[in-house]
Amino acid sequence: MDWLRELTRRLKMLTLRRQFDADLEEEMRLHLELRQEEQLRSGMTANEARAAARRRFGNATYLKEESHMAWGWEWFENAEQDVRYGLRVLRKSPGFSAVAILTIALGIGATTAIFTVVDATLLHPLPYPQPEQLVSIEYDFTGVGARDVGMSEPEWHVRILIVAPNYFALLGVKPLIALVSGGKGNSQPPNCDVLHDLPRVWRSPGSCKLLKNLTAQRSHGRGRRLLLNRS
Amino acid sequence: MHGYEIANSIQRISNDVLQVEEGSLYPALQRMLIKGWVTAKWGTTAGNRRARYYQLTAAGRKQLDVEMSQFERVIGAITRVIEAV
């Protein structure tokens, strides 16, 4: 625990360092004065006594600095000074500062955004078995001038995905909650009980209505599944 | 003792053989303060002036013993070498 006590002493010096410098100055001054008085008593003139006292004491300014630095806060005080100087310069030219800060902010923002995209698309593989075999099929309808039209159902913004019945088998995943509705000869309306396991936003009467509407719209023809993703 | 007294007593006890640059006492005292070997307290001198008085702590005394035994070992070794010549 010695190191802890030592750190406490050092920290105390750091917080009281103005007082520390004043104290050191005072005790050195006393030392010089007492020596000077002693020399005076031995018959020197005042000037000679002062010079002799100083000679014996050494370089007071240097010794003061060395005493201060012994506490090991030089790096901190230097950093503090640098930061202060930096802030002063920034305040002096606000236009330049604003441009610099904006540039850095945009730079960081853009880099973060790009990395997020790269991280999600390139660095993390898709959470499906054999993700490299998944392809996206797009099509050009030259007749109507449409290009790169996706062949699959769009993903709904409310995270409701309406997919073909073999969607999950193809991707090899299991949905958290899936609702099969409107299959051949099976047009029973969806049961809103499935919504109870979902986050609260899904449990409102509005959600149930939305669910029913969606499945009703899609229920003719082939069988459809409605996926409500928890994420 | 305060700084001036320490400087004087070093000189007096060593019969003026050891005359250090008196000011260098202060950085050394700081290092001992950090290590907890001495403590410092402000007081008043006989001439009624404010001075900082230093006192050896228990840890300081222990450190002194360590330094003394090391010093004696070195001095002993040097003496033996000189005597062998």
Image: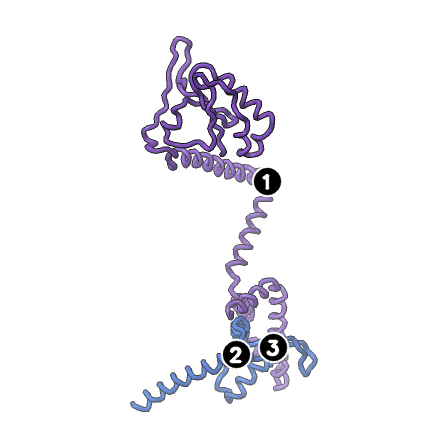
Chain colours: A purple, B blue
Give me the disc on residue B60. Answer: 2
**Badge 2: how crowded within 10 Å, few (<14), some, or many (20+)?**
some
Could you tell me if the residues under marks 3 and 2 are in contact, i.e. CB atoms within 8 Å? no
Depth check, mark 2 against mark 1: the one in front is 2
Task: Please provide percent x and percent y for residue A101.
Answer: 54, 40
Task: Please provide percent x and percent y for residue A21.
Answer: 60, 66
* Nearest the eye: B77 or A116: A116
**Badge 1: how crowded within 10 Å, few (<14), some, or many (20+)?**
few
Task: Please provide percent x and percent y for residue A214.
Answer: 52, 20
Residue holding disc 1 = A94
Tell me which label, 3 or 1, sits earlier in the chain.
Answer: 3
Could you tell me if the residues under marks 3 and 1 are in contact, i.e. CB atoms within 8 Å? no
Task: Please provide percent x and percent y for residue A51.
Answer: 58, 76
The chain to which mark 2 is attached is B
Q: How far apart are marks 3 and 2 (CA)?
A: 24 Å
Q: Most extreme residue toward the right, as rendered?
A: B48
The chain to which mark 1 is attached is A
Depth check, mark 3 against mark 2: the one in front is 2
The residue positioned 56% from the left and 66% from the top of the image is A8
Residue holding disc 3 = A31
Could you tell me if the residues under marks 2 and 1 are in contact, i.e. CB atoms within 8 Å? no
Give the image quarter of residue A77.
bottom right
Residue type, mark 3 in image: His
Q: Most extreme residue toward the top, as rendered?
A: A143
Q: Most extreme residue toward the left, as rendered?
A: B85
The residue positioned 39% from the left and 12% from the top of the image is A141
Residue type, mark 1 in image: Pro
